Image (tube, rainbow, N blue to C red):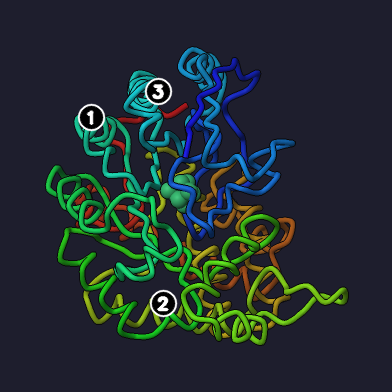
Amino acid sequence: MKLTFEEYQARQIVRVHRHVDGPWFWTRYSAHPYVGCRSGCSFCYLRSADYLGKRNPDTFDTLIQVKTNVVEQLHAELSRLPRDVLACGDWQQPAETRYRLSRRMLEVALELAFPVFVVERSPLLERDLDLLAAIGRRTWACVVISFSNLSPQLKDAFEPRSPGLRRRLRCMERLASAGILVGASLMPIIPFVGDDEAHLDEAIRMTAAHGGSFVLGAGMSMSGAQATLTWEAAARLDPRLPERWRTLYGEEPDGTPRSSAPREHQARLGRQVRDLCERHGLHSRMPRYVPAGPLAVNRWIAEQLFLKCWELDLELASPSRVWAYRKAAWTVDALPHSVADIHRRTRAGLQQLPDVDDAVARDIEHWLAEWPAQSRQRVRAVGPAAFGPLFESSTENP
Ligand code: SF4
């Protein structure tokens, strides 16, 4: 299959997200150097128009667009932004071996003291372990090594050209040995063939054995070209599988399969991953980066609110209840003043915040009482072992 590189100058590099994506990766910004990926995994959501724009999705794995100005542009854009977690890079081969743009993006993050988050299937990331460790020492670095499961048969079916699974685990081990906070992302968990206890247990056990601290898992959503390729791959693997998926996903009014499985399925997966993580001594959420300073308490309280959304989702609580906590998390995260100060002045102050009802205010009050101990404990134990809000050693955050 012929591979073509197309170089171009991007007008904007950094995507600024309105809210952090808690309780998942907690990132505020994202910036990536390439569009398209040689691995061409069938389930890859980057085939969607959100990422490819007007490009033909069939060219996703044969045409790699390269943002040749990514480094200079990243430097210019980050220099104007408040410091927060940046999801960056893309270590796919052969693009990154040829252009080394992801490495140079890490150099920019290090220079400007931006905390970094990386989610990656390519073990080429190991090459830049020195920079990740340096960023971790200066601010914060967290890496998530991504795989759906550790079955060679399922890899061959859905992601035949992606890097080897054992190499990914070795990469995880090397990062962890260098003191970098690292975990695994089981995404997507493939329905019926990859979501049983044996597959999940193996992936989580091996993450623990290779130095990972946490595992995040999520089901498979499908739309457009991604859906077509994934259903075709499923049919090649087991001709009965598409019909089982069709029953699980249900149909839109026009007869096409829905893009996501029902909430009950997602919650069951979440509970399975959480319980298996507990069995193997891992966390089922990743910690949020919380820089020191007067707003540290807001970040931590918002983290607790997002985590509460997650727990409520796993329990299949009413969507309105989940929504109440999510909106409150957004509110607290955006406050320009310390939520602890607001509460100190008057308890009613919490309820006067937008989108904070009585029940949510009671939870915030409870967490505020825990905050002094939490902050002291976490300041003392920086690094993967702390596994909580991690603090900068200085207060250089703007
Ligand atoms: S390696 Fe990652 S980015 Fe590339 S196609 Fe697979 S899932 Fe998508």
Q: Is residue 50 above or below residue 22?
A: above
**Residue 85 x %, y %:** 45, 39
Q: CA distance from mark 1 to mark 2?
A: 36 Å
Report the residue marked by disc 2. 194
User: In the figure, is residue 214 to the left or right of 3?
Assistant: left
> Which quadrant would residue 151 be assigned to in this image?
bottom left
**Residue 113 x %, y %:** 37, 25
Is 14 or 199 nearer to us in this picture? 199
> Which quadrant would residue 319 be assigned to in this image?
bottom right
Check residue 67 in the rendering and tell me which mark sits there, or answer none.
Answer: none
Element class at badge 3:
helix
Element class at badge 1:
helix
User: In the figure, is residue 42 to the left or right of 259?
Assistant: left
Is 351 or 288 nearer to us in this picture? 288
Report the residue marked by disc 1. 134
Q: Amino acid at mark 1?
A: Ala
Q: Amino acid at mark 3?
A: Leu
Report the residue marked by disc 3. 101
Q: Is residue 63 above or below residue 217?
A: above
Badge 2 residue CB within 8 Å of ligand 1: no
Q: Residues within 10 Å of mark 2 (few under 14, many from 20)?
A: some
